[in-house]
Amino acid sequence: MRRWNGWGDETITYPVPPRALAFLEASLGEGTRLEDASLEAVVAAAPPPKLPAGAMLSNEPEVRLRHALGQSLPDWIALRSGRIPAFPDAVAFPESSSDVRDLLRFAQWAGAKIIPYGGGTSVVGHLTPVAGESPVITADLGRMTRLLRLDETSGLATFGAGVAGPDLEAQLRARGLTLGHYPQSFDYSTLGGWVATRSSGQQSAYYGRIEKTFAGGRLESPEGTLDLPVFPASAAGPDLRELVLGSEGRLGILTEATVRVRPLPERDTFFGVFFSDWTSGMEAVRAMVRSGIPLSMARLNNAEETRTSLLLSGKPKLVSVMERYLSFRRVGGGKCLAILGCTGLAPLCKAAREQALGVARTYGGIDLGRAVGNTWQSKRFRAPYLRNALWEAGFAVDTLETALPWSRLASAARDVEAALVSGLESSDEKVHVMSHLSHVYPDGASLYTTYLFRIADPETALHRWTILKGAATAALLANGGTISHQHGVGTDHAPYLPAEKGPLGMAALGAVIRTMDPGGIMNPGKLVL
Ligand SMILES: Cc1cc2nc3c(=O)[nH]c(=O)nc-3n(C[C@H](O)[C@H](O)[C@H](O)COP(=O)(O)OP(=O)(O)OC[C@H]3O[C@@H](n4cnc5c(N)ncnc54)[C@H](O)[C@@H]3O)c2cc1C
């Protein structure tokens, strides 16, 4: 059973290793362990629904609670404290495009708003109902998961948009195929959610971000059906897939999505390289990507993230042997770990690895081989479970991300981190901050920053988050970063979108939304305010 107020499956825990906890307590002070609201109490406090139950609709309070929020830090604070800002009045479980069309008609008739819901893993407030007079229906796509069509000759697979990562891969792997889209939320996030938020998987350098693999599909909107036919390429005017990508449920419900799939790779390997500092690591990965070495992933931790992830590995003896070896090779306190990945045909992987290591060496990189890469790979979908344990130890964790040209990355990383580190100084609180480059491109990279602070109580935690988020966002925007590389806009980033798109861009976006949804029933308050 999935946790209702945290991350993941209830049976899986990932305790914070004692040394990591001691380090955090030494850096931030002891955490305040808050008592969570119980599921029973929160369910009992659900307001009466404004809609009756129906063939496709449940208005059970627990079902409504489980669809009321996503996974952002404000969502967590609300769930853990039991102070839910708004419940949907009903949750719909459509099973086909025709059910979705019926649902949209019903919502129009009932004056209800609709929030499409994939895996509920949004981290920027995409799923919260806007409190108001109108009833709200959350449409859970979790029954639309089948592989509907497969064109093996062309490598095109059409799925129900509610299919989650593991189910999608299992259906493809049974046929020797893969999509290879691996966001860290893979276990729960869905194909429709990936498209609607412009998601990026960890090996996007090989498989492509979702906008590359999303080949077409079907969107049911209040004004009718938008079919997106599949072509390998087309010059027939603007590409309407781009309207649906990142639409965050504002235009309608994506019911089917066709994706470009590939044969399972012959090789999929990850290896770790240490650099003596962040600057040489950045120069090295930039040189690798600019020279066209076909890596599937290049992720570079800064010194703080390297130190923290070694502590979190829970293998102190192994880490100490490794650190002795690294210091013998003159790589010490400021060391930065890069995880590099090669995917595809075995000889090409071998060549890419050798080329990448050759470049790494010219920047002083030390190859620690596959063991480090394998450890990262084995834990890549487990790391979010740490958030549960950290919360229970009294610490809140949040992340923010952006993308910038190479020329501005170093200053952006410095300014975002400085804004976070000093963000709570006025209340004499410390913030633990670390960053990594998560996706690299020839012209730039995405910068992903994680920060931890003490919770105190729910109001204080939210207040601290608001200060930190505002300060870090101001710093990344001042450096010319996008408001999001992969998480999307939701409610948390919506106030910043006009600065990025400009008045004409926002007007165009608004016009598209009004054309597809003149009554404004689709996920109001998200993306465009
Ligand atoms: C621990 C963790 C790790 C994460 N790691 C990554 C990562 O590595 N890369 C990344 O890109 N993101 C990541 N995310 C963010 C999140 O997983 C993505 O935004 C994901 O794409 C959301 O998919 P979902 O199915 O959960 O969508 P939801 O959260 O359910 O919905 C997100 C938005 O999409 C809309 N939507 C969903 N389905 C449909 C549909 N069928 N039709 C129309 N609109 C729809 C919703 O209305 C909402 O606006 C992470 C989140 C968490 C909690």
Image (spheres, grey):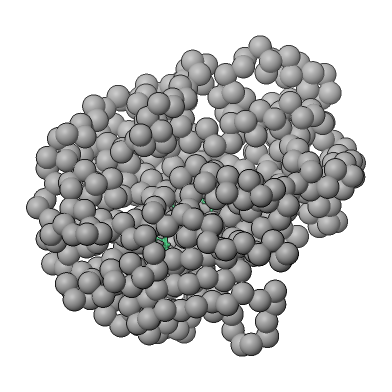
The part of the image, by quadrant, that contains residue 303 is top right
Residue found 33% across the figure and 78% down from its top: 222
- Quarter of the image for residue 290 reads bottom right
Q: Is residue 275 left or right of residue 221?
A: right
x, y percent for residue 251: 39, 74
Residue 466: x %, y % from top left: 34, 49
**Left or right, 382 with reference to 111:** right
Residue drawn 32% across and 46% down? 75
Q: Is residue 208 left or right of residue 352?
A: left
Where is residue 141 shown, x and y percent of the image? 38, 57
Which of these two is toward me, 380 or 139?
A: 139
Q: Is residue 37 left or right of residue 101?
A: left
Please state, as top left, top right, bottom left or bottom right, where the N terminus lies in the image: top left
In the displayed image of the protein, which residue is found farthest to the left? 48
- What residue is shown at x 36% (from left), y 70% (from top)? 98
Considering every residue shown, the one lying at the far top of the view is 317
Closer-to-camera residue (120/411): 120
Residue at left 37%, top 24%?
A: 393
| Relative to 422, residue 489 above or below | below
Q: Give ligand 1's quarter of the image.
A: bottom left
Q: For this rendering, which residue is in front, 152 or 305? A: 152
**Would you place residue 295 above or below residue 210 in this image?**
above
Residue 457 in the image: state x and y as whole percent.
Answer: 25, 34
